Amino acid sequence: MQSNEIDTDAYFRMNKIRAFETAVSRLIREGEVAGACHSSIGQEAAIVGACMALRLDDYIAGTHRSHGHPIGKGAELKPLMAEILGKETGICKGRGGSMHLTDASVGSIGESAIVGGGIPIATGAALSAQVRSSDQVALTFFGDGAVNEGVFHECLNMAAIWKLPVIFFCENNGYAAVTPAKSTHGQSDVAKRAEGYGVPGVIVDGQDFDAVFDAASQAVARARRGEGPTLIEAKTYRFDEHCVGLFINGAYRPKEEIEQFKQNRDPLILFREVLLKRGHLPQQLDAIGEEARRLVEEAVVFAKESPEPDPAEAFTCLFANPIAQQAYERASS
Amino acid sequence: MQSNEIDTDAYFRMNKIRAFETAVSRLIREGEVAGACHSSIGQEAAIVGACMALRLDDYIAGTHRSHGHPIGKGAELKPLMAEILGKETGICKGRGGSMHLTDASVGSIGESAIVGGGIPIATGAALSAQVRSSDQVALTFFGDGAVNEGVFHECLNMAAIWKLPVIFFCENNGYAAVTPAKSTHGQSDVAKRAEGYGVPGVIVDGQDFDAVFDAASQAVARARRGEGPTLIEAKTYRFDEHCVGLFINGAYRPKEEIEQFKQNRDPLILFREVLLKRGHLPQQLDAIGEEARRLVEEAVVFAKESPEPDPAEAFTCLFANPIAQQAYERASS
Amino acid sequence: MSATQLITYLEALGLAQREEMALDESVIIIGEDISLYAAGGAYGDIDAKRIRSAPISECGFAGMAVGAAMTGLRPIVDFTIASFVYLGSDPIINQAAKVRYMTGGQFKVPVTYRASMWHNQANAAQHSDRPYPMFMNVPGLKVVAPATPSDAKGLLKAAIRDDDPVLVFEDNDLWAMREEVPITTDFVTPIGKAAIRREGSDLTIVSVAGCLRFALGAAETLAKEGVSAEVIDLRTLAPLDTYAILTSVAKTGRLIIADYAHRTCGAAAEISAIVAEDGFDTLKRPIIRVTTPDIQIPFSPKMEKPLYPNATSIAAAARRLM
Amino acid sequence: MSATQLITYLEALGLAQREEMALDESVIIIGEDISLYAAGGAYGDIDAKRIRSAPISECGFAGMAVGAAMTGLRPIVDFTIASFVYLGSDPIINQAAKVRYMTGGQFKVPVTYRASMWHNQANAAQHSDRPYPMFMNVPGLKVVAPATPSDAKGLLKAAIRDDDPVLVFEDNDLWAMREEVPITTDFVTPIGKAAIRREGSDLTIVSVAGCLRFALGAAETLAKEGVSAEVIDLRTLAPLDTYAILTSVAKTGRLIIADYAHRTCGAAAEISAIVAEDGFDTLKRPIIRVTTPDIQIPFSPKMEKPLYPNATSIAAAARRLM
Ligand SMILES: Cc1ncc(C[n+]2csc(CCOP(=O)(O)OP(=O)(O)O)c2C)c(N)n1
Ligand SMILES: Cc1ncc(C[n+]2csc(CCOP(=O)(O)OP(=O)(O)O)c2C)c(N)n1
Ligand SMILES: [Mg+2]
Ligand SMILES: [Mg+2]
């Protein structure tokens, strides 16, 4: 059982994610957000359990559903929220948006909207740590849909042969967009795919922070010892639609299933119960929730008040080393 | 134990492959062949064992090392040899060469020089058979190197979920070009990768025709019954260098290993011993070998005497339905 | 022209697919998340085995479609967003485009690849690609890009019926565009033929995909200024209708190309090069390309929108030529 | 210029890599079958952990190189044959080219992708691609194509040192070409600068990669006929040295582009379009592209060889302009 401090920090981070996603949904309804947003609500224990097993200088790579990942890793909320509104003060200066909330300062190095795209990025960061003889590790988040991209296998295999310090962390929420995992997986446990590469595969209850944190901590320790990768499959559930605002409820997953998860398997409620049993006081936990919501609202105000980017700025940031072309004086015409 | 007829036919086909490859090597030394050739010598039992489990109207897809596959499936030798010499009478009219000895008439539908490239082709042919309610099956040959391409996994998984009539047949000869499989596989049995998809994985001695034929026949029967794919791993060995004429012997695999295989694990010698034990007469087997060599020499003569293609013909065969452009009369200039 | 119905670009695409599936049972469709539409009746009462809601395995199913096409089917692969085609580019380029040639004509490969270009929707750089130029550079592929609901129906149907691989680049920005579209199931738009959307004598504007709206808008503005612009909607990008382009330029002597793709080596470059070679003597003025500049697509709509060609930028280019 | 040594194009590439690996320990190399060369001493006494002989997993290691480049390394990815880059095109296009932009400049991506173009070697359509044009269309990538041993060394070294993703398209047909190459480890060829290989006044021949040999050969022939041709070796394909091209055409008024790529949307198209727009008034005659035609590459050398640009076809084009 982890320390008191880890408990409250974890609860704080989970609350920040929940409050952040709730605020984003509200902003979408208010018409403040362009593009598509994918909410992590329901998956907070998996996200925070994985992130808290890492050091600040460890790397994570995310997905299209990655508001929660940088928050879980400790990112400031204001630049994230400003990015979602496409503002100049956004963490990516308005260039990335919801699907690319990359925050290098906390080791969040690639929130990729290409399904599976973050997997080689994280595996490469692990290779980099190994070559640099650093003891950093990398953790890549991905969904049950992403494991059907060939690149997942390629990277799992390369991580295995080179004993790279990388954790493959699958948030199996049972669906890829509107397609149930059971219709696209030859066999239902993602973790079993690890055996083909001699990699340990672990299944955990993704709604249970303690279970995720333990499994992730073991995998991280193994990676840091130089013993190679682990594949962790956290069985979880997304409470919202694939995209916020997409109204196809019930067409591909039963309403009762959604209700059952919201009622009985909400990771925040479950973790609160655990914390109360461990002797945390209700008021203390309420205060943590309040503080999380306050920070999020501050971030919303910051984002709304931030200036729009200057369209001319669209032409910057492409190259680290732009090559200036000598100007040719166009013949008068 | 299979019938007498299967035995002698298998022995004939194995001999044709051996004689064909031997003739190609000779032609290369004589400077008659352009481009690169990859020999199947040493892998004949695996090839013929797989092919003889199939019907003529079943499909196979091959690799860069695919002189043997169409021969195993029953192709005429003359158009194959002419293709290797780039002649107009070649099976691909001189456009394909050694790496693309595709012969549609025997169900050979894609000898792909892109490693792993034949795998989706065969899986797609199996999908086609299923949609057309035909009882054809497809078998895809590939090497130990190809299983590290993501597309192998993608196709294995799709074959599993859709119960496609396809056999994934890995000729694991221990090396991908000059790279040992043990340095690039997280775990050494390719067949074990099948479990992650709920697909049966079978390991057979690829130097033993009977073992391969039995495993392939069972997989084919299963596929035809509509029960889905099987992954067969035939442990085999290539006697020649990766490319014929590449002289890097011993740099990446011990000379003793090569000698040991040539001495004790030659599939033709092993199968001959089996056949003798089963009561076939030496003279009869010699005659089969003779006939195979005679046919190959006939093919060589045919190929050498065939005309070169007309360079202008390079512009045909690109489209099934070429779109004629109205001619624009260029302004005089 | 026969009877028509008022439908959107998106409905026209669905209709084309449904009609061809009903007419020819060798037509199948593979793509991600498509079974949901099947449940909604979008495919009529087509046998479920012809509708493959696939795992997220673009390379795999793009290649499987080639194998299926070689063995009797006419698969439609729906990549959904065009930014995902790179994952399937190996089987498209190394197999679909080459198989017939490499085998000396032993096979035909009647496969259709659909990709919707989701630019201008604030989805940032990984969802906003317009990658048709790279496929125009590959011999053996046909490439179409419909700019109207009628052509969305007609070109997708022509693609499905064609015996060669055809890539259909759809313009997501046009999904809601509405038009009277021929009802008959026989209606196809021939591949390889451009359409002259407006006749003119002073200037030719060649437009790619959804740039047509802007080209026509610019032509309207220019007309008020006394400039008569001819507008050519390419419709097919490979093979290009060089006759239509060269004939128009021979008449007007001036050429602007409006192209959604990035500038370097885009479709506009090819058209310019064709005219600079075969129509040079008819040219009075420089050829101007109005394209998306060579910058990635930012998320912020404020930054994104000004990057694409529009009626204002096309008209401004035209004025520089008069 | 400092001391030189007589080495081949292939040796120059190996030397560039070895020098940069010795100078900067953040340089690593990933590719198939490379450990054999390591055993042969091709990398000197570089730590084995910096030489990754990879499984046949192009998409995976092309993407891993991006992650490694974002976190402190300078990876070189050796795709060996250029026909295999399609498998790695998703991480190159969707990640390497976009990461810096999408993250508002939080990362640099100093990765080098090497691809050897094995055309003209009787290896048929799946081993003969020259796919640089598709990458020229992707903002965020730099593309180089050395035509001499010196530039093979200088451009590969420049690519490795550059803080952005650079694709190096090497010409397999030049492997045995020999030349005096500067010895100093400081020698680099600047990215973005073309070289004028021969001065002339009547005609400009812009050449891509190994077409340089043929352009120079044609210029020689033309000189005997009294035609003075200027030959520009582009060296970098993205960004293009438009100044060098336009300045030369301003002088000669005539332009031929010799390009190994397929014709449609190739590098030659872009160069033609640039001149047709910004150099139009200096042009006396049509711009001619001498390219590989839009056909796949056949195996038979008898059919293959005539497809590529050569001195004869370039000289013939020049005569049509005089
Ligand atoms: C390469 C690629 N293919 C398809 C898509 C479209 N797409 C976006 S999210 C998604 C489903 C992803 O499912 P999963 O990996 O389970 O993640 P989840 O959405 O459940 O978090 C799909 C198909 C994409 N973004 N990238
Ligand atoms: C996509 C791709 N990558 C790399 C190559 C180069 N290559 C040709 S054969 C080969 C090794 C293949 O090994 P394996 O699959 O074991 O087949 P084997 O040669 O042993 O029959 C490689 C790397 C290729 N042809 N295609
Ligand atoms: Mg999911
Ligand atoms: Mg092998």
Image: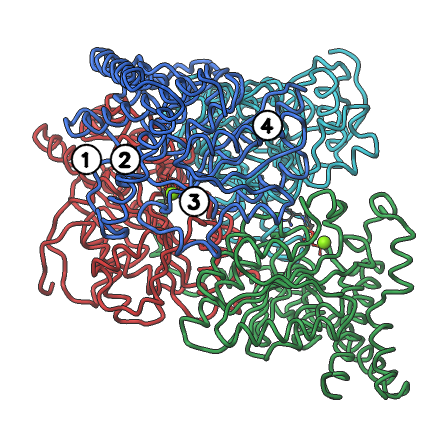
Chain colours: A green, B blue, C cyan, D red
Sort mark 3 into few (<14), some (14-19) or many (20+) by Cα contacts within 10 Å.
many
Name which residue lies at 25% across and 21% down. Answer: B85
Chain of residue at mark 3 = B
Q: Which residue is mark 1?
A: D214
Q: CA distance from mark 3 to mark 2?
A: 41 Å
Q: Which residue is mark 4?
A: B126
- The circle drawn on residue C11 is none
Toward the viewer: A133 or D142? A133
The answer to whether the beta carbon of the residue marked 3 is less than 8 Å from any atom of ligand 2 is yes
Q: Earlier in the sequence, mark 2 or mark 1?
A: 1
Choose mark 4 or mark 1, whichever is in front: 4
Choose mark 3 or mark 1, whichever is in front: 3
Quick check: C282 left or right of B133? left
Q: Secondary structure at mark 2?
A: strand
Q: Which residue is mark 2?
A: D258
| Badge 2 vs badge 1, beta-carbon distance below 8 Å | yes
Disc 3 residue type?
Asp
* Image quadrant where one finds the C terminus of chain D: top left
Q: Is residue B151 above or below residue D159?
A: above
Q: To which quarter of the image does residue D217 belong?
A: top left
The answer to whether the beta carbon of the residue marked 1 is less than 8 Å from any atom of ligand 2 is no
